């Protein structure tokens, strides 16, 4: 963990929605002197204040803040709010030695765009000094089971900033550093949107089980545990097609179901759906610079 000459770092969450809360709740807070939750919504701040988090303060804006070297900012606002927030951050960077680490979890806004939004004419000399990272966690962060795609690097990473970023997102699950920023579009289409795909399948399976006579409670347990167990197995299975064959006895029940999937080209439908999500992520990214 990087520290300035004032002592421990400070951590700023700008925006405190469900994903920011999931990260905050599971985060190791000991390395930070103070944590600030910046949330403009009054009801959300009341919610934060009721929790009475230790060494944590809720604020409506960044007004009055001064950043010190390597304080950490997590941008957890909607993509269309990033530009205005970055301009506000710019006004709070008074000297080149007082550069925060910026981590964005906003989908589609590139590190180049974030850097350009922060750097104004009076700070052009800081272009190569700013450390911008992007993270793409998913909804499973709430339970600590996310897989988070990460991108970004420090030109002279003498403080191991990537390790600092890794520590933050290891708190909500596994991490995957990608080599190209464009690969985050793939991460978005697979793991970012992935929980919705699985929930979609779960809903179909639960309704089918109910139609066949099971209670909703029993159906939900049966489906959820089947998906959890299959996912755990899937991590170590090298050849999924072989495993499918092992479960599908000739003339058996599994084969009967899989024949319908093949007849209706379910694999093609899934492939097209994922590619549509990827294309949309690229479109959003290009639209945000």
Image: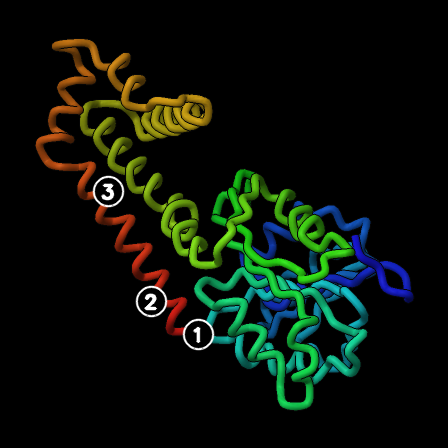
Tell me: 104 left or right of 36.
left
Q: Quadrant of residue 95?
A: bottom right
Question: Residue at the spot x=74%, y=46% of the render?
Answer: 28
Query: Badge 1 is on which residue?
Result: 289
Question: Residue at the spot x=13%, y=37% of the render?
Answer: 265
Q: Is residue 26 above or below residue 3?
A: above
- How crowded pointer 1 is (Cα within 10 Å; few <14, some 14-19, many 20+) is rated as few
Q: Residue 82: give x, y in percent of width and height.
A: 53, 74
What is the CA distance from the residue labelled 3 to the residue labelled 1? 29 Å
Question: Residue at the spot x=13%, y=19% of the render?
Answer: 256
The dot on residue 283 is 2
- How crowded pointer 3 is (Cα within 10 Å; few <14, some 14-19, many 20+) is rated as few
Query: Badge 3 is on which residue?
Result: 270
Q: Which mark is nearer the camera, 3 or 1?
A: 1
As helix, strand or loop, the secondary structure at mark 3 comes to helix
Front residue (pair 246, 162): 162
Tell me: 182 left or right of 176.
left
Q: Residue 48: give x, y in percent of width and height.
A: 66, 61
Q: Is residue 260 above or below residue 83?
A: above
What is the CA distance from the residue labelled 2 to the residue labelled 3? 20 Å
Q: Quadrant of residue 161?
A: bottom right
As helix, strand or loop, the secondary structure at mark 2 comes to helix
- Quarter of the rendering occupied by the C terminus: bottom left
């Amino acid at each position: 963990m990087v520290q300035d000459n004032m002592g421990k770092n400070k951590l700023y969450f700008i925006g405190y929605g469900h994903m920011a809360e999931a990260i905050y709740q599971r985060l190791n807070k000991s390395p930070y002197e103070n944590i600030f939750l910046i949330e403009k919504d009054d009801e959300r701040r009341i919610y934060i204040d009721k929790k009475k988090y230790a060494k944590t303060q809720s604020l409506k804006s960044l007004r009055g803040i001064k950043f010190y070297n390597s304080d950490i900012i997590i941008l957890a606002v909607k993509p269309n709010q990033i530009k205005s927030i970055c301009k506000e951050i710019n006004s709070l960077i008074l000297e080149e030695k007082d550069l925060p680490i910026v981590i964005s979890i906003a989908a589609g806004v590139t590190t180049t765009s974030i850097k350009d939004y922060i750097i104004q004419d009076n700070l052009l000399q800081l272009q190569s000094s700013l450390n911008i990272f992007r993270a793409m966690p998913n909804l499973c962060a709430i339970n600590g089971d996310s897989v988070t795609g990460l991108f970004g690097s420090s030109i002279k990473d003498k403080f191991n900033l990537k390790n600092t970023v890794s520590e933050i997102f290891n708190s909500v699950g596994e991490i995957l550093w990608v080599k190209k920023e464009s690969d985050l579009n793939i991460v978005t289409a697979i793991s970012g949107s992935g929980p919705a795909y699985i929930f979609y399948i779960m809903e179909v399976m639960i309704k089918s089980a109910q139609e066949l006579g099971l209670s909703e409670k029993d159906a939900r347990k049966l489906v959820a545990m089947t998906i959890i167990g299959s996912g755990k197995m899937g991590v170590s299975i090298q050849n999924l097609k072989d495993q499918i064959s092992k479960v599908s006895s000739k003339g058996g029940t599994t084969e009967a179901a899989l024949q319908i999937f093949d007849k209706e080209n379910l694999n093609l439908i899934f492939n097209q759906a994922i590619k549509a999500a990827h294309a949309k992520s690229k479109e959003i990214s290009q639209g945000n610079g």
